[in-house]
Amino acid sequence: MRVVAALLPHPEDGARFLVQQRLPGGSRALLWEFPGGKVEPGESDEAALARECREELDVALEVGRRLWEGRHTYPDLTVELVLYATRLVSGEPRPLGAHALKFLTPAEMGALPFCEADIPLLEDLVAGRMGSLG
């Protein structure tokens, strides 16, 4: 399964990025992740990311360049995760498809329980291995 995620900086503090907590009761319940979701057949990564963020956060995003890509196999599925630089165009993020939202620095994110697929991404972000995020 191809999954796209947004590295969405806070509009006034570019050192903090949006993360969301998964809903209780589902797979990987209450773990944290970067916002985004599944790419549907025939859909581009950018279109999928814009759609998912519109549906789950009630925001419009500008999707920029690809920052990171990785693969993780869970017992029930294999995820190809791709992170994109994004910018908030309109709206205020609301947790429509999440239990909670937080804007945090990469170091602060390290204290939260993240989905396994997101952990290498988070480690690279904390270590500054993504180059320029703009």
Image: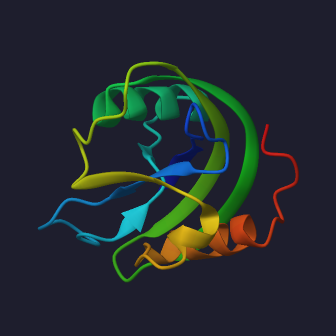
Image quadrant holding the C terminus, namely top right
35 relative to 55 in the view: left or right: right
User: Is residue 42 in view?
Assistant: no
Q: Residue furthest left?
A: 25
At 28% from the left and 60% from the top, the residue drawn is: 22
Residue that sits furthest to the bottom in the current view: 75
Above or below residue 92? Residue 30 is below
Q: How is the image coloured?
A: rainbow
**Quick check: 123 above or below 54?**
below
Residue that lies at the very extreme toward the front in this rendered image: 12
Provide residue 91's location: percent of width, then percent of height: 39, 20
Specify whether 56 is left or right of 26: right
Front residue (pair 84, 112): 112
State whether residue 83 appears in this view.
Answer: yes
Q: Position of residue 58 (x, y in %)?
A: 32, 26
Q: Residue at x 60, y 41 (%)?
A: 9
Number of numbered discs on residues: 0
Q: Residue at x 88, y 54 (%)?
A: 131
Q: Between 107 and 86, which is closer to the camera in this rendering? A: 107
Please report the residue visible at 66 percent of the width from the left and 50 percent of the height from the top: 15
The residue sitting at the top extreme is 90
Residue 46: quarter of image: top right
Residue 21: where, in percent of width, then height?
Answer: 31, 60
- Where residue 68 appears, as percent x and y from the top left, is 73, 56
Q: Is residue 69 depicted above or below 15 in this figure?
A: below
